[in-house]
Amino acid sequence: MVKYSKTEFSVGLFMLLGIIAGVILALKVAGLTLSYDSGVYSVYGYFDNVGSLKVRAPVKIGGVVIGRVSAIYVDHEKLVPVVKMEIESQYSELSSESKASVLTAGLIGEQYIGITPGFYDEDMGSTYLKDGDRIMDTGSAIVLEELIGKFLYSVKGDGGSDSDTASSEK
Amino acid sequence: MINFISGIGRYGVRKINALGRATIMLFYSVVGKPQFDKNFPQLIQQLYVVGVQSISIIAISGLFIGMVLGLQGFNVLVRFMAEGALGQLVALSIIRELGPVVAALLFAGRAGSALTAEIGLKKATEQLTSMEMMAVDPLRRVIAPRFWAGVISLPILATIFTVVGIYGGKLVGVDWLGVDDGIFWSGMQSNVDFWDDLGMCFIKSVVFAVVVTWIALFNGYDLVPTSAGISKATTNTVVQSSLAVLGLDFILTALMF
Amino acid sequence: MTDLIEIKNVTFSYGARKIYDDVSLTVEKGKITAFLGPSGTGKTTMLRLIGGQLAPDEGQIFFDGINVHSLNRGDLYELRKRMSMLFQSGALFTDMNVFDNVAFPIREHSSLPPEIINAMVLMKLEAVGLRGARDLMPQELSGGMARRAALARAIALDPELIMYDEPFVGQDPITMDVLVRLIKKMNDTLGLTSVVVTHDVPEIMEIADYLYIFSGGKVIGSGTPFDLKRSSDPRIRQFINGEFDGPVPFNYPADTPYLEAL
């Protein structure tokens, strides 16, 4: 039907425009990378306090994102917060001695999980983290009120600089 | 007093009746064996009328809304030395709210009212009745292609609106006010989630598309076939669909976030 | 002689207003039958009842022996392919040109190749003298042309029955004459059965084979034009001769007499 050709063409163009806009949104705006689903593995960390950490917060090593927080819940037996992290499969050589801490980006920024890679020594019994493993060494979030409380206490008691113990270790 | 209460009751019964008729109309137009060879050219024609002809208003509004957001956002953020967050501010507000909502409102004004008037005119001039007497179901032949065209068009228009809006924000923020290009985009990318945010945008615009098109078509199909009836129905379309969009937006947002 | 339409004891009312009260009549195959009556007596309603768009409160309507209102939706649509209706306004589709309007029912109900549709449409347009107007849009046509185009569309599928709803209203004398001749010509050459609803008495008397006169929801008289002209019934005489007031009341029925209402 020659009669509809102009209409058909513009409708085709309209559809194409919609698809292009969708692709721009996905790639440029949402930063969706096509290799995203190359596989992830989950590890767990038990924290004393996760502060205001949110699901989907990044997991970073030295500022580079290697995964995302996929769930935050409370362990029913121990009654401590558990953070489930999904680490991209390409970062599979993380030692079980690594340390995971809840850190804050900037003074008022979002909280994220920072991983400090531990050494790897088979003689010491350390292994690479696998799916379902637990990171033993964790650092909790700094809670501003606790920090201030400790600071006041140390000033009053004229004690040493203990502020680095604010993030209590398990 | 009794008159007042019975008045409310009558009003309620009338509204419920109308809702029933609207549902029956939608059911008969959408459910059934589609005849692709005959309906497809219709759909194309309606996509042209409903979708293509709405592009310019959608794109221009998107551009201006993005630019205003860029300007306002910059003025606020710069006080906190946080103009790097402009990208995510513009992107998130357009993707989550302004894109689907404003596109739906513009769509209701541009395409919805035109649909009501067109169907109403067809009804007033007995075109729908005569089609029925020709053994052609006007619900399938007239209402259905317009409904699908609306449902397909609005999500596409909302997507176009969103992209144009974000580039409008970028135009003001980056090219004019000097926010760093890299920070603008990367801040956006690290804060916009594909499923949570863009998926939300898409779901919202599909829901709005169904509601706005349905309201527009029903108002046309059910109107009193006089010129006063047509003008009243056209106004009703814009008012009802705007309210429905804003109300549903709140409900959807509350449900999904 | 067979009857195409048989209406048996039909009663129909809009809300509280009774339009038809126990009406029975028949329409003979191949003839032009006219329904006459003052405006507002619901003559158009009868056409809608026959077409199955409205259902009677009581009574039955048979089309070629089929009870129209006992059919389900699909069968009713099948039956409607055998009848067609010419609306008062013409009801041409405003978003298509004349050619596509006439082609519409053919395209909807058949999958004929474009060349055959083209030939069929041009034939129908030629029959109403509008072949040259094929590319015009409905709003470019005069009232009479629009009605002729609508007539071409109505005969597009070669129906058995064609119903005319007030075909002469608002037309100048020349157009009226053209339409009268056209209705007669269509009926005779295509072997149609025609039902014409009108109140233009002299025009329809020229061509109708049989007439029914409605008043107050009842048939008050029927017969050939010859019979009716010689009728002694004052109500029929009033209508045929176009007198202002008489047995058929000029006033819409009121609950109370005029003087009492004051």
Image (cartoon, coloured by chain):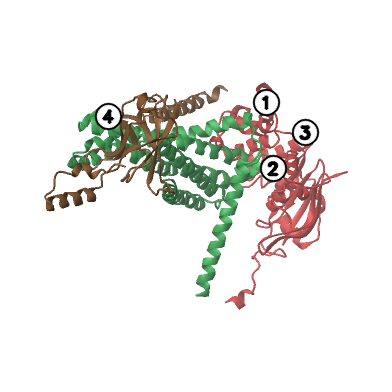
Q: Residue furthest right?
A: C1
The image quadrant that residue B73 belongs to is: top left
The numbered dot on residue A62 is 4
Question: Is the same chain shared between marks 4 and 1?
Answer: no
Q: Which residue is mark 2?
A: C85
Which subunit holds the residue at mark 3?
C
Q: Nearer the viewer, mark 3 or mark 4?
A: 4
> Which element carries disc 2, helix, strand or loop?
strand
Choose between B12 and C184: the one closer to the eye. B12
Q: Which residue is mark 1?
A: C117
- Give how far across and how far down residue B71 sits, in percent: 24, 38
The numbered dot on residue C189 is 3
Q: Which sits earlier in the primary sequence, circle 1 or circle 3?
A: 1
Q: Is residue B196 among what the camera can see?
A: yes
Q: Residue furthest front?
A: A123
CA distance separating discs 1 and 3:
21 Å
Q: Colour of chain C?
A: red
Horizontal side of C164 relative to A130 (left or right) equals right
Q: Which sits earlier in the primary sequence, circle 2 or circle 3?
A: 2
Chain colored brown: A
Choose between A140 and C7: the one closer to the eye. A140
Chain colored green: B
Above or below for B17 versus B218: below
Callout 3 touching callout 4 (CB < 8 Å) = no
- Give how far across and how far down residue B119 sits, in percent: 54, 44
CA distance separating discs 4 and 1:
75 Å
